[in-house]
Structure formats: C-alpha cells, structure tokens
Amino acid sequence: MPLIQVGTEACQKEHQGHPANNAKERGVVEKHINFLHHSPGRIRIRVKGLKGNAQLSEAIHSTANKVYGVKQISASTVTGSVLICYDHADPHVLPHLQSMMNDAEELLGMGVTDPAAFTRLLSAYAKEK
C-alpha cells in the first residue's frame, strides 16, 4: 500500500480500543516511514531512526532540495519528522515523492541506516537538468 494513503481518523480510533493493540497481533506491518499529514503542497512524515540522528538529518537536508518537485524540506532530529513542501500544481510530483518514500521505506526495512545510502537514494530522484 502506498505510504501517502492512510486510514481515516475513525478507522484509527477504532483500532485504539482493539483488544490486540499490538501491531503484530493485528497483522499490521511495522513501517519505518509513517505518513502523518498531507495537504496540497505539504506532506509530513515520521522517519524511524531520524530522532537524534544528525547525520541522517543532514543527508536529507543536503540532498532533498534537489529532488524533482520539492520546494523545501525540513527534517527534525527532535521529533523524528520530515516536512516536505512540494509543487502541488505539477501532477507528476506526488507520485514521484510517493515512489521515493516507498524506496526509502524499503531501505529502512532492510536495516540500512547509513546516511550515504539515503543521499544516493535521494540523488536518484534529483531534478533532471
């Protein structure tokens, strides 16, 4: 399932009272990148491993502004979240970002936390010159 699609608030509240509140018991796959909020031109995600990781934050900051459609990016080592401001007028940007986040999720799922790996990943999604 794409990262940008997320259950409704009502669905999330339904699971809060679920007797098996453990994600594994509910059959939910643990994500390393969790979608928090989306509005046209802005996506906020939480990245497992970003909290307290200045090297990963720097890798995101130094490379992500080169990603196609990204206007601005802010990665917080305090909250572990990333705010991506993008060009919502271009219909190709959101699928491009979704693909990039899915690739990043795959890297994190394999246990890769090396900032250089994320720099290479983000560079692969760089704006075409």
Image (cartoon, grey):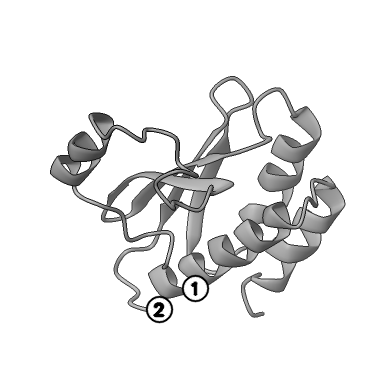
In the image, what residue occupies the spot 86% across and 52% down?
Answer: 116
Task: Answer above or below: position of 113 versus 64.
Answer: above
User: What residue type is disc 2 on?
Assistant: His
Farthest left residue? 10
Counting from the top left corner in percent of width and height, residue 99 is at: 53, 71
Task: Answer above or below: position of 20 versus 70.
Answer: above
In the image, what residue occupies the spot 75% across and 55% down?
Answer: 118
Counting from the top left corner in percent of width and height, residue 96 is at: 49, 73
Quadrant (top left/top right/bottom left/bottom right) for the C terminus: bottom right
Q: Do the residues bearing badges 1 and 2 touch, measured as CB atoms within 8 Å?
A: yes
Counting from the top left corner in percent of width and height, residue 37 is at: 32, 43
Q: Residue tagged by mark 1? A: 96
Q: Residue tagged by mark 2? A: 92
Estimate how packed mark 2 is, as few (under 14), some (14 to 19) or many (20 or more) residues with alpha carbons within 10 Å.
few
Q: Secondary structure at mark 2?
A: loop
Quadrant (top left/top right/bottom left/bottom right) for the N terminus: bottom left
